[in-house]
Image (spheres, rainbow, N blue to C red):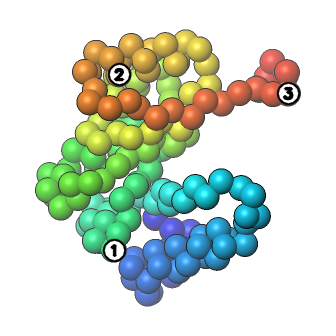
Amino acid sequence: MLRGGSMTAELGVGFALRAVNERVQQSVARRPRDLPAIQPRLVAVSKTKPADMVIEAYGHGQRTFGENYVQELLEKASNPKILSSCPEIKWHFIGHLQKQNVNKLMAVPNLSMLETVDSVKLADKVNSSWQKKGPTEPLKVMVQINTSGEDSK
């Protein structure tokens, strides 16, 4: 969940999370005062990590986790141990989403954010699938915009 997996393995998830959060807070303290005081959110990328490590991080206060493979996200978010131990967990899908995986992704329990949507067709499919689910709250979505004007981007 943290870069430099050896730090996590040697010192534990709790220590590693505290270290990252301290660095984030130090950066927040250095930002110009004229910027809005929006608290940053740490997304712990849990890809390839076992459910027990997600639960351990949750126990140390981490609430938001990210995955970049739909199947792995669905498996973790549906894991009975995670569901029972982590009632306030939020999941982000990070990376490129293929249209054929949209319906699977929209079935993920506690899906909170989709990072990123890179086409109108994908946005329409996500919106349609999310509405069919009958959500209790909106899905947050980050939109990727081609600002260079290059067709290949």
Instruction: Determine the residue positioned at 29% across, 42% down.
Output: 110
Question: In the rendered view, does 9 fall on the left or right side of 141?
Answer: left
Amino acid type at image mark 1? His
For mark 3, what is the residue? 148
For mark 2, what is the residue? 130
Q: Tag 1's secondary structure? A: loop
**Crowdedness of circle 2 by 10 Å Cα count: few (<14), some, many (20+)?**
some
Q: CA distance from mark 2 to mark 1?
A: 31 Å
The quadrant in which residue 9 appears is bottom left
Amino acid type at image mark 2? Trp
Q: Which percent across, then down, holds residue 4? A: 56, 74
Q: CA distance from mark 1 to mark 3?
A: 42 Å
Q: Tag 2's secondary structure? A: helix
Q: Which percent across, then down, holds residue 131? A: 33, 17
Q: Is residue 131 above or below residue 57?
A: above
Instruction: Determine the residue positioned at 52% across, 19% down.
Output: 123
- Residue 41 appears in the picture as rendered: yes
